[in-house]
Image: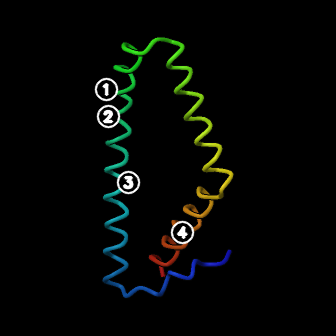
Amino acid sequence: MKQPNSLKPAKPRRKTQIVASAESFVTLLRLHIAKEDRILFPMAEQVLNPDRQEEISKAIAQLSREQTSTGAYDRYLALAQALDKESKQ
């Protein structure tokens, strides 16, 4: 797989910073998702009628399909894999 042009070999200290930032982001994202699951989604189920919930669900599914079809997921996955590989060198 071709590495993105914007990636240049990082110095060891920079690699450590990149890894630490990525790990912090993963932690933040997990906390965010957990909060949605525990608070936001149950609250939405209480205040939104089933028709509105279905409408939102369909809109989210459509957005997901659009993002997948543009290759965004694959590009970000390739970037994450390249950074992971680089951090281990």
54 or 41, nearer to the observer? 54
Mark 4 packing: few (<14 Cα in 10 Å), some, or many (20+)? some
Task: State left or right for residue 15 relative to residue 86.
Answer: left
Residue located beneath label 1 in the image: 39
The kind of residue on which mark 3 rests is Val
> Which quarter of the figure has residue 79?
bottom right
In the displayed structure, 32 sits above or below 15; it is: above
Q: Secondary structure at mark 1?
A: helix
Give the colour scheme shown: rainbow
Sequence-first disc among 3 and 2: 3
- The nearer-to-camera label among 1 and 3 is 1
Q: Residue at (54%, 73%) from the top-left corner?
A: 82
Residue located beneath label 3 in the image: 26
Q: Are marks 1 and 3 in contact (CB under 8 Å)?
A: no
Q: Secondary structure at mark 3?
A: helix
Cα separation between marks 2 and 4? 27 Å
Q: Are marks 4 and 1 in contact (CB under 8 Å)?
A: no
> Which circle marks residue 79 in the picture?
4
Mark 3 packing: few (<14 Cα in 10 Å), some, or many (20+)? few
Q: Secondary structure at mark 2?
A: helix
The kind of residue on which mark 2 rests is Lys
